[in-house]
Amino acid sequence: MTPPPEHDVKRLGTTPEAVEPPSLPPDEIIRKFVAKEDQFAEVRPTFTAKRTIRISEYDRAGTIIGEFLQVSEVTRMPDGRVVNKVLEHPQSSLKTFALEPEDVKSFERIPQFPINSSQLAKYDLKYIGTEKVDEIDTYIFKVTPKTVDRAHSYLDGIIWVDTKYLEVVKTYGKWVNELGDVKFAQMPFTTFETYRENVAGKYWFPSYERSDETVHVKEGDFPVRLVIKWTDFKPLAAAVSDTAPAPAAGAAGPQSSAPAGSTAPPAPQGAPPSQPAPPPQR
């Protein structure tokens, strides 16, 4: 589908006008989309995807002056381990802040499915209206944590839910805990806009995530942008058993009692000129 026009970045105000009630009771909408989130969170580790992380720095004219790029892919090794294999990692040219390998790894801590059944009781969800995301009619819910702690990150923002299939197609907000806004390593990014993509005709997985911030250094203020893309979703290859075939009946030599090779568990999960985000696809 055609991406939205450049600079067409929509934001929802914090004090919307009075809206008509949805066609379904809000509690029923919440119950149904949370059940879908549980399903998606369970299935996502069984899929691999190519992940591209790009961080760009801009000058006041909107010209890129520094950039970091990493392309990786989750894959299963011959020994059964599931690893995130780096495919492309050129040298960083960022100027406003240093970037270490562990800093990039911290992005894996961003929850991809924040509003699931185990976390629902910790949130207050308020229906605030409807909006069209690309060609999809959606219900909009404001998400506010009721309680926070230091061990977990909680979404404080907005989610968009498909009115027909009751599935989350977009989220926007920041991550918070007991100490305030969560920052990933020493990077400035706190607020994320995440679009999802329909995979295999029945799952909605995050496929595009963006965060825009400003770095303040002695040379001035520099806009920076983080974009994470997931592409080429496909089922993760099954582990290959290394069990040797049993000797034929009557063959000489002792029978082997070695157990079959075990399968490792899947790995855990995901003002510059506006760059249009690819809309969710159904």
Image (cartoon, rainbow, N blue to C red):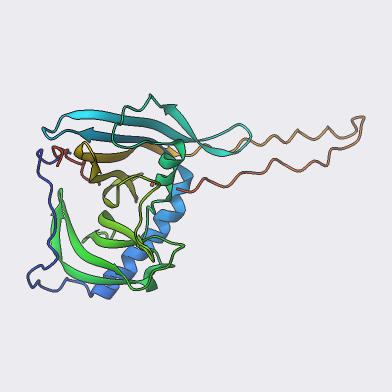
Q: Which residue is outermost to the front?
A: 218
Name the residue located 43 percent from the left edge and 50 percent from the top edge: 109
Residue 178 appears at what percent x and percent y? Answer: 39, 66
What is the number of callouts on the image?
0
Name the residue located 32 percent from the left edge and 37 percent from the top edge: 97
Residue 94 appears at what percent x and percent y? Answer: 30, 31
Name the residue located 62 percent from the left edge and 35 percent from the top edge: 240
- Residue 84 in view, yes or no: yes
* Residue 30 found in image quarter: bottom left
Residue 266 appears at what percent x and percent y? Answer: 53, 46
- Residue 238 in view, yes or no: no
**Going by the image, does 47 lie left or right of 256?**
left
Q: Is residue 78 above or below residue 46?
A: above
**Going by the image, does 125 lie left or right of 78?**
left
Q: Nearer the viewer, residue 5 or 29?
A: 5
* Residue 199 found in image quarter: top left
Q: Is residue 269 above or below residue 3?
A: below
Q: Nearer the viewer, residue 50 or 174?
A: 174
Q: Is residue 239 above or below residue 40?
A: above
